[in-house]
Image (cartoon, rainbow, N blue to C red):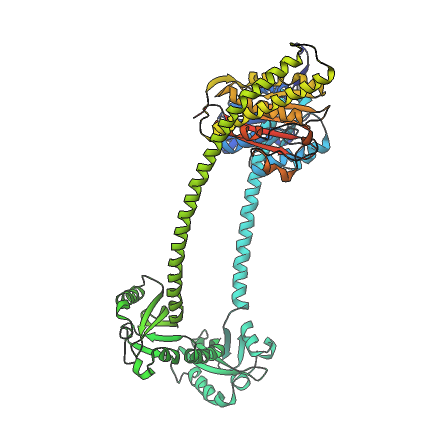
Amino acid sequence: MRKLGGNLVTVAGGSKSKLITRVKSRPKLPPSTQLEDNENGIRGQLRNGQNISILLIEDNAGDARLVQEYFHDSNLYSATLKRVENLENGLEILSKCEINIVILDLNLPDSQGLETLQRVRHNFPHIPIVILTGFNDESTILAALQEGAQDYIVKGELTPNLLTNSIRYAIERHCIHEELDQKNMELSNLLNTIRAERDTVQKYLDIAAVILLVLDSNGIVTLINKHGQEILGYPEEDIIGQNWFEKFLPLTCRAEFQEIFEEIVSGQKELMHFSYDIPVITKSRVERLIAWKNELIFDDDGNIAGVLSSGEDITDRREGEEQLRATFEQAAVGIVHTAPDGQLLRINQKFCEMLGYSQVELTKLSFMDITHPDDRDSSFLLVQFLLAGKIPSIATEKRYIRKDGSILWANVASSLARDISGNPKHLITIVEDISDRKRAEEVLKEHQEHLEELVKDRTVELENAKVLAEEANQAKSDFLANMSHELRTPLNAIIGFSEVLKDEMVGPISTEQGELLNDILQSGVFLASLIEDLLDLSKIEAGQTTLEFSEFDIKDLLVNSLKLFNEKAKGHDIELNLEISGEIGKIVGDERRITQVVYNLLSNAVKFTPNGGKVGINVHNDENGIQVTVWDTGIGIAKEDLPKLFQPFRRLATQLSKTIPGTGLGLSYSKTLVEMHGGRIWVDSELGKGSRFSFSLPREMK
């Protein structure tokens, strides 16, 4: 209902009604709405008349229609407005379309309150949002703004001018926030760069891996860095001002190096740069070997003022070199150094033992001399690739020839050592004896080939068994079909004569006789139904069932199906419902078969719903076609029983099912029919809370 010529408009939509009062202007707009537009981004688009895309997410049709009217009455001539009814569709449009601003109702069918805003902000944080609310609740509005909304509109205060201002203000505020975020990020990056550079310089001073030392011309220490203090074990104040040679050099070499120093600083030796390996004495009286590099320091007059020295502690390196030599000789694998031309340079004892040669004998051979003839070409090629830099290393398996002529299988790993100029110096090769493993692999290969033969034979047996099983299944289907036909003839006579007797067409009967005849008739009808189901099932299994396609109205089919259960539902005080969402229209399929599916599902729903319950059908469009759901408030199905559904001759054992007749074929038959249409069927149920049987069908068969 809309009141023309006044300010009050009432719009009814769906199950709710909202009151919207038109007013001429919003009481007060934030001052930032007056900010000037610039030429960039969304603000520039508004100013230059370029198209702005707006998404309205509002489930109430009346509210949405009024917003759309005001939108068309506004001065946003270059803007376009799209509208969806729920959040899920809104998020889908935002993901696929370029949207500049969102007008969002917080209370939607699939999302309520601030969660609605949070979900949009989480997925699309860079799109400005205007909240559309039916209540002028300051706490809700403030919470929405804190969650990232740029503005809000109270539905009762909505005008075209207010709609325009809110959109412009939201865009302006969003752009300003993004600019501030960008400036803050740039400032933060600049500060981080400055701090990093400062920390880098400080790090060089504090954690340099060398000793930095300055001696004056008398050998007195004038500067030493932190690393030097740590090596010597003294604080800076205990080092500065000390005579370096007398305080920190061992007595065994003190005089020698002090004399050299004096000759250099006095000019007797014309050296600008000089290096020595000189030990020092630490505070704990331990000697550390230091590799020194020295350079003269001159004063302003060009006179030698002292020496700048950098020293590297090589004590551990020297010890490591000694350990490496020991490791080389005592390693459990063969280690070989080979010249680029293939000559064996250095061999450890293990490699000698592996091949049965002495070290002297091996140094007279090349690696090609001890390589198996069949592996020489591939080994030579790999070495050439390594020397040329085409590969970083070699990892392969190869065969060596022992001194006694026997074969040694080895796992070989080689890398290239280069000199200071980068030229190949020698190859370092690690050789592991894998002869035992190779022999085991040969045995395993034989067993594997035997196993493959066994598997092949077993596969043939299984294929034969499969053929026999398929033949047996076909025989079963043929038997069911034949027996069903044979049973129907006498069964039709039983049903017919029972009806004749029950209707007293051949004479009156007593009440007790009527009850007995009714039992016979009901049992015959049930048995006939079972035979029909068996026939249908056997036809499907035999591949004899075909679908007769035509175009039909699914709504009429569902309405007519519900009518079949009106009387039975009334007798048990069961409420029947039909809910159709959207325009369903027509589909192409076998109308009779789809009716059977709906009938089977409705029959089960009514049978297993206690007196006073509800049974209904929901139907809506989905991405592939249509989806039909038959639901009830009946006894439900236990979670562990769900996998047993849709299997032929399977009825779930419940207290109620024991008293209700059934063949156990309806769901299985329905599943087959739906799948023959290219659809699928499934169930959602909870014990004691009812069930929802759903099936989907394509709109047209391909």
* Figure label count: 0
Task: Mark yes or no: residue 149 visible.
Answer: no
Q: Which of 285 and 662 is in front in this view?
A: 662
Q: Which residue lies furthest to the front in this view?
A: 507
Horizontal and vertical percent for residue 291? 45, 78
Residue at the spot 56% in from the left edge and 79% down from the top edge: 232
Residue at the spot 46% in from the left edge and 79% down from the top edge: 323
Q: Nearer the viewer, residue 421 or 474?
A: 474
Residue at the spot 32% in from the left edge and 78% down from the top edge: 345
| Quarter of the figure that contains the N terminus | top right
- 119 versus 424 height, above or below: above
Q: Nearer the viewer, residue 47 or 577?
A: 577
- 85 versus 642 height, above or below: above
**Left or right: 49 in relation to 368:** right
Horizontal and vertical percent for residue 234? 59, 78
- 397 versus 298 height, above or below: above
- 103 versus 240 height, above or below: above
Residue 294: quarter of image: bottom left
Residue 380: quarter of image: bottom left
